[in-house]
Amino acid sequence: MPYRHEPVSARSWLFAPGDSEKKMAKAMEGEADIVLIDLEDAVAPGNKAAARTMVRDFIQARPEQRRRLWVRVNPFDGSHTLADLAAIMPASPGGIMLPKVHGRADVEKLDHCLSALEVANGIEEGSTPVIVLITETAEAMFRTGDYKGAPRVVALTWGAEDLADAIGASSNLNADGSYAFTYELARSLTLLGAAAAGVTAIDTISADFKDLDALAIRAGRVRRDGFRGMLAIHPAQVPVINAAFTPTAEEVAEAQEIVDLFSANPGAGAIGWRGGMLDRPYLARAERLLRQARPTQPGSHRGPTGV
């Protein structure tokens, strides 16, 4: 029976190349909420077969970490995806990242593949969650709102580099280093698509892993926009991301005060507070922040649909 997955509560998603056990181990030993072991861009074509075996063995040897160890497989527009999945699913990874989708149909195809491999390997069918990179092809940009109810999807994220390649751009940046309009549009569509689907929005990488001050500023901004985490390419970025996406004690206290105020006045549509007025959207935001302060484990789910 299919699972109904909770939107994943993970702040930091750290990439690690799947052909380096040393780098996978370093990523796992750090503070990242999720380690994204990469079989796609980080692994040269000639190394992919060996990397699949290495990734499977790495996950199987660490059952206590399995739910943190997700795998980015290759996209369906190439020849590697099925081999990736067949190799790694016996290890029952915590989740799968699907890149370079063209739309929801790719997610549904992945669901069919995963279901068959779960059954074949004694894994409960439907239990492997998925995060999708939804802006890396031009076609996918027009379908960012199509993921409501998509099987297994717990989070959506975006990418700027592959999108630039897909549309033939020489750069995705403005002269001041900020993203050009098309890529800010991709970010906004990802946020809106995740909200429409009821899943978690995750911001893309910060390529300059040495500029941690800029990372902190950006992470704080996108969190205010509605993102709930970020992708990372270096372990040094992880503590900065975790701090930015963790509600502060002051925020938690304020949110609890708002929730308590409405709880004490259940029939009120608007309530005076600190010299102003609060209506129900303030209550919804306060409740959401309190849920973020009590995150679920990566890959968690409610169980079989209807239970």
Image (spheres, helix red, strand yellow):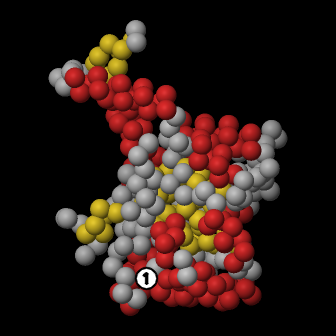
Name the residue rendered at 47%, 68% in the picture.
67
Say how many tags the image has.
Answer: 1
Tell me the quadrant of the picture where the C terminus can be found: bottom left
Residue 21 position in % (x across, y down): 69, 78
**In the image as oriented, which residue stretches furthest toward the top?**
275
Residue type at the position of mark 1: Cys
**Residue 48 sits in quarter:** bottom right
- Helix, strand or loop under label 1: helix
Residue 151 position in % (x across, y down): 37, 68
**Residue 17 sits in quarter:** bottom right
Name the residue rendered at 50%, 38% in the picture.
247
Q: Is residue 43 among what the camera can see?
A: no
Residue 258 position in % (x across, y down): 35, 25
Horizontally, is 71 left or right of 167 in the view? left
As displayed, is residue 86 above or below residue 146? below
Query: Within 10 Å of the Cα at label 1, are there few (<14), some (14-19), or many (20+) other Cα atoms?
Result: some
**Residue 62 sits in quarter:** bottom right
As displayed, is residue 259 above or below residue 92? above
Horizontally, is 26 left or right of 257 in the view? right
Name the residue rendered at 67%, 40% in the picture.
216
Residue to which mark 1 is pinned: 113
